[in-house]
Amino acid sequence: MGELPKDHQRANRLHLAMLDMQDARRYLDAYAELDSQSDGLKAELSHTLRETLIVAAIVAYCRPFSRNQSPGQAVKKLSIDEFWWITNNSTQRALHVLIITKRDTFVAHADWDARSTEIVELTRTGVKRTFSVPDVMEGLDPKEFSALALEVEKDCFYQAMALQHRIHTEQGQAG
C-alpha cells in the first residue's frame, strides 16, 4: 500500500482517535457502574477492578497523543494544541496534561520519580524494601475525564469531516 496524502493520513488518525475516545468513555462508564454497585464485591476486588478501568481509560485516551507506527497511512500522533476547544479551556487542558503525565510516568512507564523503591533493611537472609505507590486517581475525576474524552471525540469528528470534505473537493477538481 502506497503512502497516502497528508490530509488523508490525518483524517485516518482522527477517526482512530474517535474510537480511542469511545473506548476511554466506555471504560469510564463501566467504572461509574461498578462504583455505584460495588456492594456485592469484596472491597479489595472492587478497588482493583475500578483501578483497572481507570488505567485502561488512560491508555485509550492517550493513544492518539502518543507516537504510533503507521508509516504513510496515518499521522504518528495528534497534538492537543490542534484541539481549539480544549486548549482554550484551562480546566480541560490541565486535565489532559494530568492524564498524559500519569500515562507517561507510571501507567505505561515506570519513571523513578513516580515508581521507586528503597532498601529499608538488608540482612544476611533478606531484604526489606519500601515502594512508592502512585495514586492513579489523584486529581482525577472520572466524570470530568469522560467529558474531556467526549470533547476530544467531537473535535476529532469535526476535524475529520472538514478534511474529508477538502479531500473530496480536491479529488473532484482533479478529475
Image (spheres, helix red, strand yellow):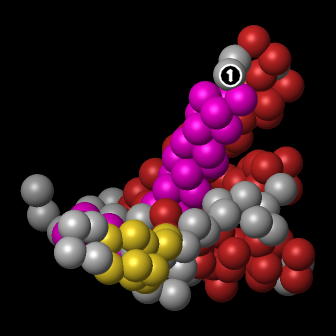
Q: Where is residue 100 in the image (x, y as percent from the top left)?
A: 58, 73
- The residue located at (62%, 45%) in the rendering is 51
Image quarter of the N terminus: bottom left
Residue range corresponding to the magenta coloring? 43-72
Is residue 60 rendered magenta in the image? yes
Q: Report if residue 18 lies within the magenta region.
A: no
Q: What element carries label 1?
A: loop
Main SS class of the magenta portion in the image: helix
In the image, is 97 to the left or to the right of 63?
Answer: right
Residue 152, x across and y down, in percent: 69, 60
Q: Which residue reaches farthest top? A: 40
The image quadrant that residue 50 belongs to is top right
Q: Give the number of callouts.
A: 1
Q: Can residue 66 be seen in this view?
A: no
Q: Quadrant of residue 97?
A: bottom right
Nearest to the observer: residue 114 or residue 103: 114
Where's residue 2, x and y in %? Answer: 12, 63
Q: Residues within 10 Å of mark 1 (few under 14, many from 20)?
A: few
Amino acid type at circle 1 is: Lys
Q: Mark 1 points at which residue?
A: 42
